[in-house]
Image: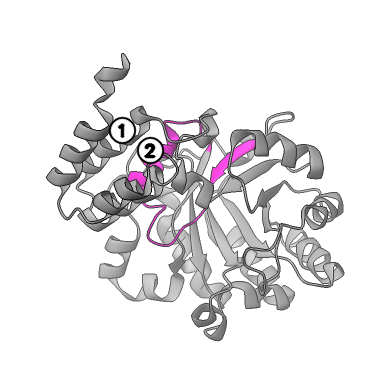
Amino acid sequence: MKTDLTNGDTSVMDMFERGKVLKICAPMVRYSKLAFRSLVRKYNCDICFTPMIVAADFMRSVKARDSEFTTNERDRPLIVQFAAHDAQTLADAACVVAPFSDGVDLNCGCPQRWAMSAGYGACLINKPELVKDMVRLVRNQVDNPNYTASIKIRIHKDLRRTVDLCQKAESAGVSWITVHGRTSEERHQPVHYDAIKTIKDSVSVPVIANGDIKYLRDVESIHQLTGVDGVMAARGLLSNPAMFAGYEDTPLECIWDWVDISLDQGTPFTCFHHHLIYMLERVSSQPERKVFNSLSSTSAVIDYLQSTYGSVHDLGT
């Protein structure tokens, strides 16, 4: 959190222009950090989210703030996602990150047991009045009318409850709503696009669809199915960070961009390596993956990439 980057005259909301479906990088624990955000922004990603940050820990510890939230002047538009279960803590955290970001998002969708038992994540979809209070306090407390306050939710089995939640959030001033089209019990079942369409038709704020976006063509097909204003991808971007630029699989240029960004930003080896494991999964054979996954240093990874795939210059780029 080095420099004050706020421009009070601009807003992410201006990006929701008619006809353009926004392409968004999801909040991903351990993965949607600055280096990866820098990569996907090179390949037509419109908005990026930080990984989910527990607001109470963030406010309690300078060490947590420094390790959990890193950005730079090119890392925009940026939405900081928080886990919180009381309005004041969320609003306080929003005020801390507001000079360095474009909005905050309240996680109401994480289905993991630890989050739900702590009162975070998907259990909040059953507390619409609390969500309403949290959104309202962020809007009232952050001293920038263009700063956004959004929520990311899962759906209920009884969709009327989800519509009620979204309408309550809208009445509190929510900027937009991201809908992961599964219940908190569902993991790999098909996404309920009909539910996302019902929600989109029930509110006037922008709605983002999340779940099973794997290729650029999915963006348009989901827009046609649901009428949403944007789509958010997680695993699809992990396996192909150039997905939103129309590539079917991770291009070699993108792999070398990741190497350059990681070296430039000092990305820890484990993170650097894990991202490459995801990126190479669809374009490498099982024996190749076995060798690559066992590599244990940055220099070994770079040597492997050069000997197996060649450099970017070999592509003529």
Across and down, in percent, residue 291 comes to 24, 51
Residue 15 at x, y = what percent?
62, 34
Q: Residue at x 32, y 53 (%)?
A: 70
Q: SS at mark 1?
A: helix
The residue at the point 36 percent across, 36 percent down is 74
The image quarter containing residue 40 is: top left
Tell me if residue 36 is in the magenta stretch.
yes
User: Badge 2 local density, few (<14 within 10 Å), some, or many (20+)?
Assistant: many
Q: Which mark is residue 257?
A: 1
Eyeballing the image, is 15 above or below 135? above
Q: Residue furthest front?
A: 287
| Disc 2: which residue | 39
Do the residues bearing badges 1 and 2 touch, measured as CB atoms within 8 Å? yes
Can the viewer see residue 74?
yes
Where disc 2 sits, the SS reads helix
Corner quadrant of residue 185 = bottom right
Identified at 59% across, 38% down, the residue is 215
Report the side of 167 relative to 216 (left or right): right
Q: Relative to 291, is 238 on the left or the right?
A: right
The three-letter code of the residue at mark 2 reads Leu
Task: Identify the disc placed on residue 235.
Answer: none
Cα separation, mark 1 vs mark 2, equals 7 Å
Count of numbered circles in the view: 2
Q: Amino acid at mark 1?
A: Asp
Magenta highlight range: 22-46
Quarter occupied by residue 108 = bottom right
Pick the front one: 35 or 203: 35
Mark sitting earlier along the chain (1/2): 2
Q: Work out whether residue 195 or residue 61 is closer to the camera in this orientation and state it.
A: 195
In-front residue for pair 198/106: 198
Residue 126: within the magenta? Answer: no
